[in-house]
Amino acid sequence: MAFQIEHRERLSYQEFAADYLYPFKPVIVTDALRDWKAIGRWTPEFFKREFGTMKIRIGDDLKGKAGYKTASAPVEFTMEGFIDEVLQSTPESPAPYFRNQVLYDLFPSLKDDIQPLPEYFEPNWLPDHFLMSHVEKVLNRGAAIELYIGGRGGSFPVLHYDGAGSHAFLMQVYGRKEFILYPPDQEKFLYPSQEKLNLSMVNDVDHPDLTRFPLFANAQASKFILEPGELLFIPSHWWHTTKMLSPSISVSINVLNESNWHELVSFVARGRKSLLVSLGSRAYLSCAGAWRAWRDREWRKRAFKEAA
């Protein structure tokens, strides 16, 4: 039976941590963005009016990811031209998907529109300093708030779970988006790619090739719609993809902390071909997580005391 996603409002951090964060259970919080100026302000027409001459490039490079065709070269648009595509988008001819764009890099003037950030994002270890520079670079990039703009009929190009074992928070600002989620125990039906373990080789969940992927017929998905002003929490290792039911604007952020650090350790260790490198990565990251867990005890005490 498909997993049912709960809807909550006035959800305290303590309730979120106890009922969803540590149990790795998805939830939709219906009032988490109630103070955001972006709700009601950010529309396709707003981006066309305020940023119409901005040049953007859109393309999905799925080369080397088993089951997916190599994408064509990125296409350049002005924001005005792209928004026109979004407004004319249909399921038969969907607009390109402007996705995973670092919001504060492209649109620093919009930072205040998404304040305050929900307390559920804390603590987040992704922006921290790490001794290994390549680890720091990857994790720091994962902490960025990302923007997504697309049209009716568009979709995320791959069934996946978020890399580095991170939790994902998705905030719907404008329009309606359908989510398709699979719990971790469904992975045996989802054909993870050997080249990139968090991507499924099943490249069309609506019309799967059951000759190539016969076990996918057994996969049980939860499907639901995220409405404007709602926040969705997707825990580590939950497989998901999306489809847009209307012109859509969303933002997302990834989070790593004590609740899911073990997922990062496992994700990195499994991706190393050398046993020694795998063991070394596991040892370093385990120590890094243990120190941060100790550091956060005081943060947690303060947070819970202030909420009492």
Image (spheres, rainbow, N blue to C red):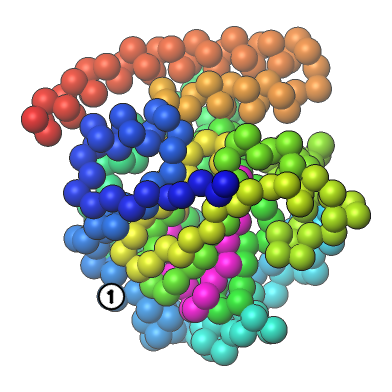
Can residue 181 be seen here? The reply is no
Label 1 Cα neighbours within 10 Å, binned few <14 / some 14-19 / many ≥20: few
Can residue 22 be seen here? The reply is yes
- Which residues are drawn in magenta? 239-251
Disc 1 marks a residue whose amino acid type is Gly
Horizontal side of 93 relative to 126 (left or right) equals right
Instruction: State the image quarter where residue 16 is shown.
Output: top left
Counting the numbered discs, the total is: 1
Residue visible at 75% across and 10% down in the picture:
276
- Closer to the camera in the image, 275 or 20: 20
- Closer to the camera in the image, 297 or 133: 297
Any magenta on residue 243? Answer: yes
Residue visible at 53% across and 13% down in the picture:
286
Image quadrant in which the C terminus is located: top left
Instruction: State the image quarter where residue 237 is shown.
Output: top right
- Closer to the camera in the image, 298 or 140: 298
Residue annotated with mark 1: 40
Horizontal side of 28 relative to 99 (left or right) equals left
Residue visible at 29% across and 69% down in the picture:
39
Q: Main secondary structure of the magenta part?
A: strand
Instruction: State the image quarter where residue 249 is shown.
Output: bottom left
Give how far across and how far down residue 131 sits, in percent.
52, 19
Any magenta on residue 14? Answer: no
